[in-house]
Image (cartoon, rainbow, N blue to C red):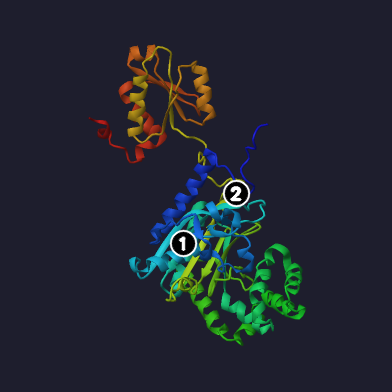
Amino acid sequence: MAQQTRPARGMRDFLPEDVRRRDYVIGIVKDVYQRYGFEPLETPALENIETLTGKYGEEGSKLIFKVLRRGEHESSGETDLALRYDLTVPLARVVAEHRGKLPKFFKRYQIQPVWRADRPARGRFREFYQCDVDAIGSRSPVVEAEMLAAVSEVLQRLGFSDFTIQLNHRVLLTALLNAAGIDAALHATALVAIDKLDKIGRDGVRDDMVGRGVSSEAATTCLEAFESPDRFDRLVAQEEGGAEARQNVAQIMELVEATAAKGHVALTPRLARGLSYYTGAIMEVAVADLAGSLGGGGRYDGLIGMFCSEQIPACGFSLGLERILVVMGERGMFPEGIGASAADVMITQFEGEPIDEALVLARELRDAGLRVDVYPDADKLGKQFKYAAARGVTFVTVAGADEHARGEVTMKNMVTGEQSAVPRGEVVARLAEATGAASRTPHPASRHDP
């Protein structure tokens, strides 16, 4: 019986076209983040179990992939390691561990996979990439404004225009829950329910809150406040920290007007975000006609202090790469040709012809910046053309006995069907110009010299 070949549930194989599309998006994310002064960071896939536990709230802790102890301890059923749940908690550990080596204001981006023992669904996987950007060391609202600007610029570069970054403040939510008469012990679980408002609607959230121990009256007060900004402001203003938090949000909104995020940020009182480590401003990307979010984040001034004696302010944002790829694919947002071809040129082979001449031409074309594939077997020309067409190769070169005798190479454009005979000494320049490789930085041919 043949073995099962499908990947584990919630996991995926990425074929070449998938990887090229992902690389395209990651390239834009990296470029934007680097231009905002963020530096790259990577952390291990596995963390000590105590690093992750107690950081994500009750709901999040259930989704941590735990790893059984190994060797002689395997039969104990105990765990000592876990797969990375997100990139934020590992960052907090890194800052605590390497604080002396890092600058006063540490800005990093990190693009790596994370794992969650979640129920797989459309656009939801157990292994997925996050594109995180975080700023450590400052409580200034400039941090949030710059972060919102960077995220907005990424989305605009990718072709999104109909997005809104919803903005709220965790202290405003705490003030609202207090004003509604919800006991502090129920705040965390109430926020988990509120965070589902866009998914299950007002009635669903009210029932969920009541099921978690919140009174029906208190749940109704909260939900009505989300629908009336004036009522929301009145309720939070009477509670400790409410006025200060509202002022902080107003400062962020004002600063955003000078950035690439202008016109894309909106105060959204109902925005909750369920992770328990948020302490200040919280943010989430909403796109028209899209269930769920493309990313989110917020300020977490207390998280790093859980790993060291120093309380270090921090703020971050995570873009969901998988969701972005799905939406861009469904909307046809990828530039033409992305993911379609592995090579610009394919060089054919003929029976009895010296293969070294094909390899010399391939080397010259690669030195000029082209992506080149050499057909490995001597085969009928029709089969070689068919193979090149199936791979999406733009040009094919033919250099049989007749071409050699004339000192020429035949170039065939696989898109238009046009073909022409080109002097051997001109073929590299002609192909470089035709494919756009002439504008790329060439690799020096001298590296092949002895």
At 52% across and 37% down in the image, what residue appears?
Answer: 340
Asked whether 107 or 420 is in front, the reply is 107
Amino acid carrying label 1: it is: Val
Residue to which mark 1 is pinned: 133
Q: Is residue 38 above or below residue 410?
A: below
Position of residue 200 in the picture relative to residue 286 (left or right) = right
**Residue type beneath disc 2:** Val
CA gap between label 2 and label 1 equals 21 Å
Q: Residue 417 got which mark?
A: none
The residue mark sitting in front, 2 or 1, is 1
Q: Quadrant where the C terminus lies?
A: top left
Q: Is residue 261 visible to the viewer in this orientation of the structure?
A: no
**Residue 241 image point, x, y percent:** 55, 84
Circle 1 crowding by C-alpha within 10 Å: few under 14, some 14–19, many from 20: many
Q: Quadrant of the N terminus?
A: top right
**In the figure, 66 relative to 431: above or below?**
below
- Which quadrant would residue 230 be assigned to in this image? bottom right
Q: Residue at x 68, y 66 (%)?
A: 196
Q: Is residue 203 above or below residue 411?
A: below
Label 1: element kind = strand
Which residue carries the number 2 mark? 326
| Horizontal side, residue 276 vs residue 364: left or right | right
Which element type, helix, strand or loop, lies under badge 2?
A: helix
Q: Nearer the viewer, residue 288 or 301?
A: 301
* Residue depicted at 60% across the width and 57% down the height: 76
